[in-house]
Image (tube, rainbow, N blue to C red):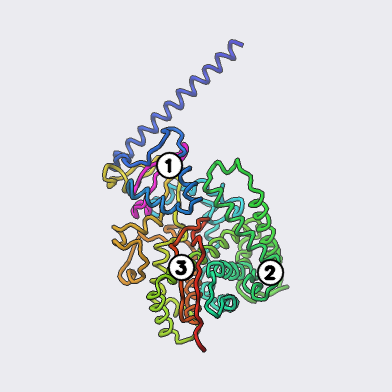
Amino acid sequence: MALTTFLATAFGVLSIIYYAYKHITTLQARKRLAAQHGCQPLMHFVPAHNPLVDFTIMKESIKAARDHTLLSVIQARFQKSANTFGARLIRKPIVATVEPANIKTILSTHFKDYSLGARIDSLGPLLGMGIFTTDGAIWAHSRALIRPNFAKDQVADLASFERHMQSLLKLIPRDGSTVDLQSLFFSFTIDSATEFLFGTSTNTLAMAVAGREAGDAERFAVAFNVAQDACAQRFRRGFLARFRRDPEGDAATAECHAFVDQFVDEAVRYRADVEKGLAKEDKYVFLHELAKATSDKRQLRDELLNVLLAGRDTTASLLSNMWFMLAKHPEVWAKLRREVEQELQGRLPTYEQLRNLKYLKYCMNESLRLHPVVPSNSRLALVDTILPLGGGPDSKSPLLIPAGTLVTYSPYAMHRRTDLFGPDAADFKPERWETLRPGWEYLPFNGGPRICLGQQYALTEAGYVTVRLLQEFERCEDRDGGVWEESLTLTVCSRNGTKVGLTPVEK
């Protein structure tokens, strides 16, 4: 008994000595690293009510999200503090930044020093182990699997867009009465994305035109919305999400998985038949191409849902936000319409013609600047590392980032910095892009090794839809009357939709 007590005591004392030694050597190593790079301490902080366990940031953020003001609250924190400041999320230290040099370091220069952190906890239930939820070798494999499928030939398939565009046009009132374009844009992008990915479209717009009851595909579209919202709720609640059940979100997630699994099963069978000479390839289907590289059904499902999330929501949000602003700026609408008329003369646009519409590009760039569809993001430091800015009273010195620090960055707040984009940075002004050639201060599709693979697909789709609407309607009236308010899930769009009145061209 005495020996057991002695051994237990000795083990406890040795453990304390070991962890004390480890802590001291870690601090010494960090001190040497900081001195080597000329680091200064972080001087700007969001005040904490408790220096050890603080819920201030979390409570403020949850309240702001409920009030649909989270993005402006985040921007105000930078304006009140500095372009790089510190805070505490419960027990975890946070460094928040809107410095382009820091963001470049995080996403590119020192890419391997950071991970996605706990993103898998929020998105994993729906998206599984895919390109947007994983790091390291698993992520690299996912990216290598997906990248070839966003070549120009696939991105430039405008015939698919036109088929769904015809249904969308039939759902817009011809008498100029109010229509919410945002709901039509989200239907359009899920219809086009599912056709691109699965080879079969959800056809929600065509079903609405025909007045038919919702089938499996339409129910999937609804379930996908609910499942995404559940992901966003988990993300905002952090570790507290595990203590709150969400039966509706769980049911929607299961429905999404079951729907996609049908196509995965068919694709694996089809690929086997092609290899045996029992079937032939007639058209490009994203899923069929993935099935050439792997027959792992779980991996195929995960990658499909990851790409669907990006392909559907980013484009729909871009369209919704841009048309919200176009309706409120008739002079921009008129100028954009003149460009389309002069360059296309009523013809359907080709891929190259879309790329050559300069003012259209300016409008999309400006929308993505004011309302980036992914307005905030974060990375977790895996090792002790350095940011080039943020230290010292003026935040101009290098800053040590200890391992385990969560580093957040806000494209929304960065894109509205007046020192980067001028005193009119809060205004919608496409003309600024005539001379603007930004670097890392403009981040609509992330950057570095994780830059969005589908950005050309999104810009092509958004450009095509915009051109076709401009060809069909000669006037656009704002029917909202208010200012833009955020609806923030995994992407951001207008809380009140995109309500307009459109006057058709006389033919």
Please give the name of the residue rendered at 48% of the width and 21% of the height, measured from the top-left corner. 14
* Label 2 element class: helix
Task: Point out which mark residue 319 bears.
Answer: none
Give the number of the mark in front: 3 or 1.
3
- Mark 3 sits on what residue? 324
Q: Please state if 100 lies on the left or on the right of 298 as rendered.
A: left
- The image position of residue 159, as x and y in percent, is 56, 79
Mark 3 touches mark 1? (CB < 8 Å):
no
Alpha carbon separation for disc pair 2 and 3: 49 Å
Task: Point out which mark residue 405 bears.
Answer: 1
- The image position of residue 13, as x and y in percent, is 49, 19
Q: Amino acid at mark 1?
A: Thr
User: Which quarter of the picture shows residue 154?
Assistant: bottom right
Sequence-first disc among 3 and 1? 3
Closest to the observer, 348 or 187: 187
Give the number of the mark in front: 2 or 3.
3
Task: Point out which mark residue 275 bears.
Answer: 2
User: Which quarter of the picture shows residue 364?
Assistant: bottom left
Residue 440 appears in the picture as rendered = no
Read off the magenta span: 83-104
